[in-house]
Image: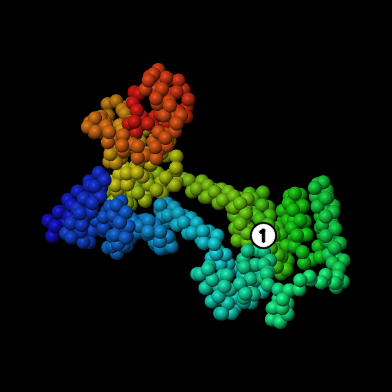
């Protein structure tokens, strides 16, 4: 038994090496053989899941991820593998459920939280695409129908609910159901416009409607209108509103409030007089009065079937009062309410602004260098015990507590390397370098992980910068020699790998940069002039790091 487990470990290491080198099928073979020898080792299923994902066999990646969780349900990596596979399969609701389960195992995981956000974006995009062609597929239609007095009653009717369900699932059936007055009314409520059937109800079932048309139609007699004139109070209220608008434009705010108040007394069923008065209170910075008027306006509007857009405006104005008071939590509540009624780019932008501010406030409130050091030390202990997932969790916490400490990013990069997460390790190394450009370990971690991904030219550049800091570092020198040997062994392969980088592709496809590179090849002295331009210099350094050009 011990021999079998030892052989399984050997096969796992072979699989890891193959995966590092991009030989994913070989890696799968090694992991499969290892699983036969040690089927209770959850890491083997996890690593094979990653390999399957790399060759786009997502169903098999999903199966292995599920096995990982089955063998070790308290290991967060299994949930990450499963959710990732589901995302590739575009099963975003299922992926959300897995990320949620993963957060129960690892509540502090930023990767799980980011995964949930990504799934929500994909689901929202899909819902938006559906709503473009089918109004019955829009999100939140039940709330809109319950807010309307007429459709609210229909929502109690099982037959009506079945009708909604059928139209939601089959938008092609809408045209055949338009003769049903409930469908027309429902569309009016959902779209916020008054729709009417184009048929002439008086002509239906009229035997004369099929009679031949006379050659010359008789001129219709003029009929006296029996419509009642507009209610005098409503007419007077409209006049007062016009006067109030004029006063508002002149910044005669007290006069405007008085005029709108009189209009409200004469026509209490019209919400716009309340929202106009609220606007004046807003200009006077009397935010409590503004909110009171807006809430009353919403109440009046709902009772009198006001357009959703108008109700949304009232909620948006309440949000603006809280935004002015820097009460971002309450502002966010009312911006969300406004968007539920009617989508407005301006309100959406303010909602996102509030979310960003609140998230930043939460992040800053969480910062504590003392607790960060405590978490980092715990992470180091786990690292020494080769418990890299636990170390990673501690380093995540330490970074949240002190995001400006370069050494924590360096430590986390080392943990990522042990877990074969080379891209993430490079990202942490770059952040380490950004925070402290003189910290040699940042460059060493970057070089080591780029070497693992066979990005020899970029690794060489990072390691050379490390030697610029400490020329006596033998470990760095050995890695640099390896990089140079690999580059000299197959320089074309190095360039080929570099050209797969989107950033390199963008630079090389830029006509201006191509002209600059041509000038430099014909006249090396031109490089000095081009390097004086910071934007061009930055692009040239990218090409140098990728091994496309050399000018050391």
Q: Left or right: where does residue 143 sit relative to residue 230? A: left
Front residue (pair 295, 402): 295
Point out the image quarter for the C terminus. Answer: top left
**Percent position of residue 62, x then y:** 32, 60
Residue at (59%, 50%) from the top-left corner? 349
**Percent position of residue 511, x then y:** 45, 31
Q: For residue 451, which quarter of the picture? A: top left
Q: Left or right: where does residue 449 sit relative to residue 4? A: right
Q: Left or right: where does residue 332 sit relative to residue 241? A: left
**Above or below, comparing residue 204 to residue 168 in the picture:** below
**Above or below, comparing residue 294 to residue 361 in the picture:** below
**Percent position of residue 385, x then y:** 26, 49
**Percent position of residue 469, x then y:** 34, 27
Residue at (75%, 49%) from the top-left corner? 283
Residue at (25%, 50%) from the top-left corner? 24
Residue 549 appears anywhere in the view: yes
């Amino acid at each position: 038994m011990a021999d079998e487990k030892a052989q399984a470990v050997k096969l796992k290491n072979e699989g890891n090496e193959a995966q590092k080198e991009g030989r994913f099928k070989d890696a799968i073979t090694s992991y499969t053989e290892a699983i036969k020898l040690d089927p209770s080792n959850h890491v083997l299923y996890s690593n094979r899941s990653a390999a399957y994902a790399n060759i786009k066999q997502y169903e098999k990646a999903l199966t292995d991820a599920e096995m990982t969780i089955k063998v070790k349900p308290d290991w967060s990596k299994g949930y990450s593998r499963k959710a990732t596979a589901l995302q590739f399969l575009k099963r975003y609701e299922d992926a959300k459920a897995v990320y949620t389960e993963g957060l129960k195992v690892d509540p502090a995981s930023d990767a799980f939280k980011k995964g949930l956000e990504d799934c929500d974006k994909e689901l929202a995009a899909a819902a938006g695409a559906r709503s473009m062609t089918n109004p019955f597929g829009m999100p939140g239609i039940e709330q809109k129908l319950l807010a309307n007095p007429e459709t609210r009653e229909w929502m109690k009717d099982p037959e009506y609910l079945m009708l909604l369900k059928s139209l939601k699932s089959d938008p092609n059936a809408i045209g055949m159901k338009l003769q049903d007055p409930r469908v027309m009314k429902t569309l009016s409520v959902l779209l916020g416009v008054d729709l009417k059937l184009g048929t002439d109800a008086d002509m239906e079932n009229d035997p004369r409607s099929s009679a031949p048309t006379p050659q010359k139609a008789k001129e219709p007699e003029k009929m006296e209108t029996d419509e009642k004139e507009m209610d005098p109070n409503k007419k007077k209220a409209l006049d007062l509103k016009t006067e109030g608008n004029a006063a508002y434009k002149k910044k005669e705010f007290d006069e405007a409030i008085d005029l709108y108040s009189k209009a409200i007394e004469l026509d209490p069923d019209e919400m716009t007089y309340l929202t106009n008065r609220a606007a004046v209170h807003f200009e006077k910075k009397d935010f409590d009065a503004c909110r009171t008027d807006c809430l009353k306006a919403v109440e009046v509007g709902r009772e009198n079937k006001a357009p959703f857009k108008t109700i949304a405006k009232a909620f948006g104005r309440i949000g603006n009062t809280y935004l002015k008071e820097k009460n971002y939590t309450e502002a966010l509540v009312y911006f969300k309410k406004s968007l539920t009624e009617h989508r407005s780019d301006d309100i959406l932008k303010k909602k996102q602004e509030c979310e960003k501010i609140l998230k930043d406030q939460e992040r800053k409130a969480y910062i504590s260098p003392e607790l960060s050091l405590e978490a980092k030390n715990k992470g180091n202990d786990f690292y020494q015990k080769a418990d890299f997932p636990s170390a990673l969790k501690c380093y995540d916490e330490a970074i949240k507590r002190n995001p400006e400490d370069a050494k924590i990013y360096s430590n986390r990069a080392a943990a990522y390397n042990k877990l074969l997460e080379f891209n993430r390790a490079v990202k942490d190394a770059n952040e380490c370098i950004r925070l402290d450009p003189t910290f040699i370990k940042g460059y060493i971690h970057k070089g080591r992980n780029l070497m693992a991904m066979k990005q020899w030219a970029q690794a060489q550049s990072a390691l050379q910068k490390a030697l610029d800091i400490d020329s006596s570092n033998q470990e760095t020198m050995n890695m640099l020699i390896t990089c140079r040997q690999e580059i000299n062994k197959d320089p074309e392969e190095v360039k080929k790998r570099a050209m797969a980088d989107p950033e390199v592709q963008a630079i090389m496809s830029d006509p201006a940069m191509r002209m600059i590179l041509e000038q430099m090849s014909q006249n090396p002295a031109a490089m000095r002039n081009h390097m004086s331009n910071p934007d061009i210099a930055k692009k040239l350094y990218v090409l140098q790091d990728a091994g496309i050009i050399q000018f050391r």
